[in-house]
Image (cartoon, rainbow, N blue to C red):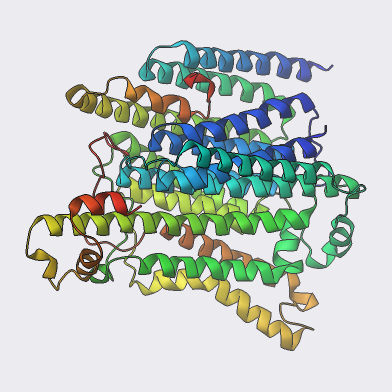
Amino acid sequence: MPDVSLPDPHWADLPLGFALLVLALWLTWTQRDRAAVIGFTGYGLLVAIAWVRLGSMDVALTEAALGGGLMGLLLLTAAARLGEETDQPAPGLPARLSIALLCLGVTLVLAAVVLGLPSPAPNLVAPVASHQAVTELGNPVAAVLIAFRAVDTMLESVVLALAVIVLWSFGADRAWGARPRALHLGPPSPALVFLGRLLPPAGLIVGVHLFWTGADHPGGPFQGGAVLAAMAALLWLARLGEPPRVSDGLTRLGIVVGPLLFLLIGLAGAVIADAFLDYPEALTKPLILLIEAAKTLSVAVALALLVAGPPELPGPMPPRQSGRAAKGVTP
Amino acid sequence: MNEAQLYGVCGAGLVGIGLYGAILGRSTLRRLLAFNLVGSGVFLIFGAIARRGGLAGGAQSDPVPQALVITGLVVAFAATALAVALLIRLATVAHEAASAAATPGSTDDPSTPATASQGRGERGPGHVGAGHS
Amino acid sequence: MSLADAFTAVFVSLGAFFFFAGWVGLVRFPDALSRLHALSKADNLGLGLVVIGLLPQASWPFGTLKLIALWLVAVLVGGASAQLLAGAIHAQAAETSTGGEPGRGTEAAPGANGNDKATS
């Protein structure tokens, strides 16, 4: 999107940056965990606007979908299940003061580094632009993700698959093979069921559109996958469907198909093209499309399962640690 | 001050606030939140650097740092999901241990291995409730 | 300044006015439910006016359709989440009226909109 020029009201950045800092302070010092979690969701959306102001639409979309949406859901369910934890005894004033000074020092050093960056700024805009034509992708970020730094992206999709495996292993031994139940928070309210019926069809289109348009415009497998995962999580939260059992073969295939396909095509590149993760020239665009489609699916499945939590046996609600109110999504 | 510097300094502030919260947060969940604040601050600084590079190279933002931040965001989410699962599991195990210790004789129940091992480590329900986090 | 630009300026300003009214309601209203009411009304109307104002600037047909779809989704999600929040506030009010700690239920609303000023 090189022809997109941002409007230029620089004075709008000052309140936004200020709001981010104030919100972060409020998140740290406010009393109730659940209020802090809701505030954090709003914080994620504000950060997404900051990314727009920094000219990174791709990151803004990812931040809004992941940092604002899915992360909010994940932390809200966690807050609902954990209840309000009792405050831990704070250390004495000298210790707190010295920690605050240390943090202030870190901030000051970082700020000094940011303000003292070399000028002209070193960058890789020109190398990316000059090689971008080979990939037939119009979006330079997509070209970097899938071609120029493909090994990072591949390892990252492996990390997602590993994260799901580790998450599942957090379940109790006797619950192995059961369904994840982190999103089971009592009977859903009618409004949630209504939303769960109406939103997913639209969300499905948006998710696939984000993946498809990612070749030439902001978007891509991560953004599309995150939207799809949010729709699945909404269905599970509204109890219109159940997360699959962890022993389900199709689910497991869905988690690994993205990294596996990426790895196989990468290995084939060592034989039919010049190097590992190199694509033969005639097939570059179709191969990239194939990898991205599989990656979108895997990202969606993995993110949705990460929100759904480890396998649990059906049973009473897990503990709440104190008598204070701890309601999640209840009528 | 241009917007790259402004958001860079903002990111530096977020790292400091998050660091304080991660050390001295009220509860484990709040420390996790604060840790995510640190991450978001680091990403913002990276974004500010990408913006500077992009403007110097004739684009809105340098695509290479953008791509790295996108992968970083996804990994940060995965790490947070794991941490949340650990917190809930910890609370469940502590709760089971507390209720097992409250009813005498049930700590040796072989059908609940997690409860039994936790029961050996902790003594009494009051201690379990306060000492897990 | 063309006619389309003037149209945009008028409608976006109107929308901004409604957002401002919603913000005033958020800050000034005494309890969570009335804040929620002010916000959801002002958000739907304000966003609708902003979208109408931006229609002449968007590319026909897909840009226009996307903008309209955006407003529809926002209305749907905004309405449903306002319902959910109100339900949670009611449940909490019922709980606190039996268990003490009055007034705590009002804390959730300001955070829900990422607006920290309301807590001051």
The answer to whether C99 is drawn above or below residue A115 in the figure is above
Q: Residue at x 22, y 54 (%)?
A: B95
Query: Residue C84: image x %, image y %?
Result: 35, 32
Single out the residue that lies furthest toward the front. A94
Q: Is residue A138 visible?
A: no
Q: Nearer the viewer, residue A31 or C4?
A: A31
| Count of numbered badges drawn on the protein | 0
User: Left or right of B16: which side holds B25?
Assistant: left
Single out the residue that lies furthest toward the right. A120
The answer to whether A325 is drawn above or below residue A169 in the figure is above
User: Left or right of C36: which side holds A282?
Assistant: right
Q: Nearer the viewer, residue A91 or A224?
A: A91
The image quadrant of residue A146 is bottom right
Q: Residue at x 79, y 63 (%)?
A: A136
Query: Residue A8: image x %, image y %?
Result: 81, 29
Q: Is residue B121 visible?
A: yes
Q: Residue at x 31, y 63 (%)?
A: A311
The image quadrant of residue A89 is top left
Query: Residue A123: image x %, image y %?
Result: 86, 55
Q: Please state, as top left, top right, bottom left or bottom right, where the N terminus of chain B lies in the image.
A: top right
User: Left or right of B43: which side holds B98?
Assistant: left
Query: Residue C40: image x %, image y %?
Result: 46, 22
Q: Nearer the viewer, residue A58 or C102?
A: C102
